[in-house]
Amino acid sequence: MRWLLIILGLIISNGLFAQSKIDQVAIEAKTIDGIFYVTEKLHVSLMDTVTVLNLKSINFSGSEISKVIVQVNDDQRLATDLSYELVNNEGLYHIKIGIPDAKLRVIQVSYLVTTKQKEVYLPLFFTDLAAAASENDFFNMLISYPENESFYLHFPAGNLVRSNEISGYETIQFNLPALASVVRLERLASHTSSPFYIKAIDWATALLFIAIGIIIWFYRKKLIYG
Amino acid sequence: MNMQLVIFIGYFLLVFIIGWLSMRLTKSEKDYWIAGSKLGWGVGGATMAATHTSAGTFIGTIGVIYAVGWSFGWVLLVIPLAYWFMVAVLAPRFTKITELTLPAFLQRRYESKLARGIGAVIILIATVVYIQAQIVAGGLVANIVFGISPTTGMVVFTLILLAYTMVGGMLAVAYTDFLQMIIMIIGTLISVPLTLSHFNGLSDLLMKVELIKPLTFDWSGFPTVLLITLSLAFFLGSVATPEKVVRLYAMKDMKAIRKAMLLTIVVVTGINLLVFILGLAAMVLFPNLATGDLAMPIIAKAVLPSFIGTIMLAAVTSAMMSTVDSLLLVAGSALSEDIYQNLVNKNASQSRRLFVARVGIFMVGTLPLISVLIGFAEGELIQFIVVLFTAIMGAGFFTPVVGGVLWKRATKQGAITSMIGGVLITGLWKAFGDPLIYPVVPGFAVSVLSYIVVSYFTKPPNESAWKPYFEKENKPLS
């Protein structure tokens, strides 16, 4: 009997959430006068039995989220048509969205992030759902800033594409196989490719390996045979 | 992407060079299987630590911590205990006679070719299971780093492994393990502070983990019974798995073994503690992963600066390769020495046996790849595939190996029954038993009981079987 209950519980919980997934996430962030305007689109696949969706965002140091607007599907229906609640609970922003009769396919969250520090943390919203895949273009982000400013992207690291195709703006674009919970930027005083200490860490590591290799070569017989 | 490719290609070139140089140094079977029993504590300890630290650590442990929280940390506490047991209890008598393989020890101790053959078969079965986990991990890393499909990544990973293991034998394996351990230590030591730099210290990370997944710090995240039984699996597997035990033969004497094991304990414990932090950081920075097993590759790709991130991925790949090459070698020796020469062709020449070994390595290397490609263990966390392997090996070998050096009355019938019973019950429990009790428990219980009961009800062994291991003076026979 116990095993029957456990199996039934697994089937029920799998039915509710195991097949509800995030299919893709696309985010645009634009800064004007020190304020970041963030638009996040989450493409989801939800089971019919899901009635509430939770979006969360972690408050990293010094960043404030405000003026949150939630839209669903592509019909520009505003959050006033849905039951929706934003709670700021000691470092965690929490949006509970009541799911109406129609099935949700796209959730768009727009908000402002204000920060006065040199280090900029842009909190991003995530759900309790697992990602549907780990393809490199699962998560796409485009960050735009005025061309008289300069930013370095500390997190997420990886392959970035910088361009200045938009008049008056420079952009940073990247893809990742997973949704990050935050983007960490550093305002630079001038247009440089990266802060000096990042390059220093890379070079120091390379030199360390070379030094170890040399030491191993000179002491190879003692190391191998004791 | 270009730098990542350059670093990976450079690393693999280095590994091939080591394999080729080792081939030139390999003059005999003893060199091929146990590095001529000449290894000092530095390389000996490194190869032991590198063998232990596989995808199960860098991907599996982080993946489980990501999925269920830090209660899994209890299981990791038994690892230093297991290595202490190995050096304090097992090694002094076990190494009195140098053998080429663990099944060869079973044959000598129990004066039974059948025991040796059964041991070899268990090794082959368990090895295929374990290598599957590593291959899956290799595919994940390739997917994250190079954007190639996991399937392609798995195939490439397997081919590279087979190439240098078949060529160089234990010498290649030991020297590449040493290289890989250096990379793993440095990679982990650098990764942790860099990852923490995205937070205001460790306390900030812990606070954020508490916010998004409060159950992370609940010790009941894992059922207690399962935790205890998993710990037992790790303990038994850490002590008596063939790929670790055979390294005792590769080191030159007990003094080297003691120092090597101390090095192993320090390195393995240190790395496990550090990867713990990486698992928690992944939870906060990437809360919606498709599977917890992606946590480490995504940290290396998206959290660390490019060079260090690639080195860390090379370290993760190293960890997997260092474990798989050891297992391939053990499986190759099982097929060549313990089955082919022992049961099929007693007069096989050395060159014939080495040829059979290389064929065996190829077969055992490709079978896991095929079974993964056809969907075996799809969706299962890597750590649990690894633990299943550990359970099979532990339940199968711990009793006859440890019992063989501690109990003179043990007979060959007891050993054979113990191995078969242990593995069979472990497998059956995995398939049909209570999932809250890890299969190693009933498997080990049956293994011990049958060992004792059957030994008592069968004719005592000849003195020649146990005496060499229980004599006070060390008289190496090779």
Image (spheres, coloured by chain):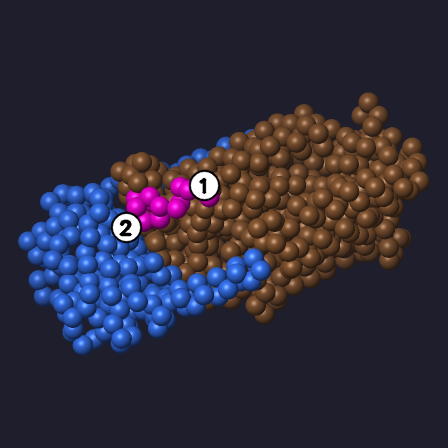
Residue appearing at x 71%, y 29% in the figure = B89
Tell which chain the image draws in blue: A
On the image, the x and y values in percent for residue B16 come to 57, 52
Chain at numbered mark 2 = A
Marker disc for residue B468: none
Mark 2 element type: strand
Q: Is residue B211 magenta?
A: yes
On the image, the x and y values in percent for residue B302 come to 34, 52
Where, by quadrant of the figure, is residue A143 drawn?
bottom left
Note whether B83 is above or below A71 in the view shown: above
| Residue designated by label 2 | A155
| Alpha-carbon span between mark 1 and mark 2 | 31 Å
Q: Nearer the viewer, residue B166 or B189?
A: B189
Note whether B272 is above or below B14 in the view shown: above
Q: Nearer the viewer, mark 1 or mark 2?
A: 1
Kindly tell me whether residue A23 is visible in this rendering: no
Marks 1/2 in contact by CB < 8 Å: the verdict is: no
| Residue designated by label 1 | B219
- The hue of chain B in the figure is brown
Question: Which residues lie in the magenta part?
Answer: B208-220
Residue B207 left/right relative to B254: left
Residue appearing at x 51%, y 66% in the figure = B151
Residue B113 left/right relative to A60: right
Residue appearing at x 23%, y 74% in the figure = A73
- How packed mark 2 is, by other alpha carbons closer than 10 Å (few <14, some 14-19, many 20 or more), is many
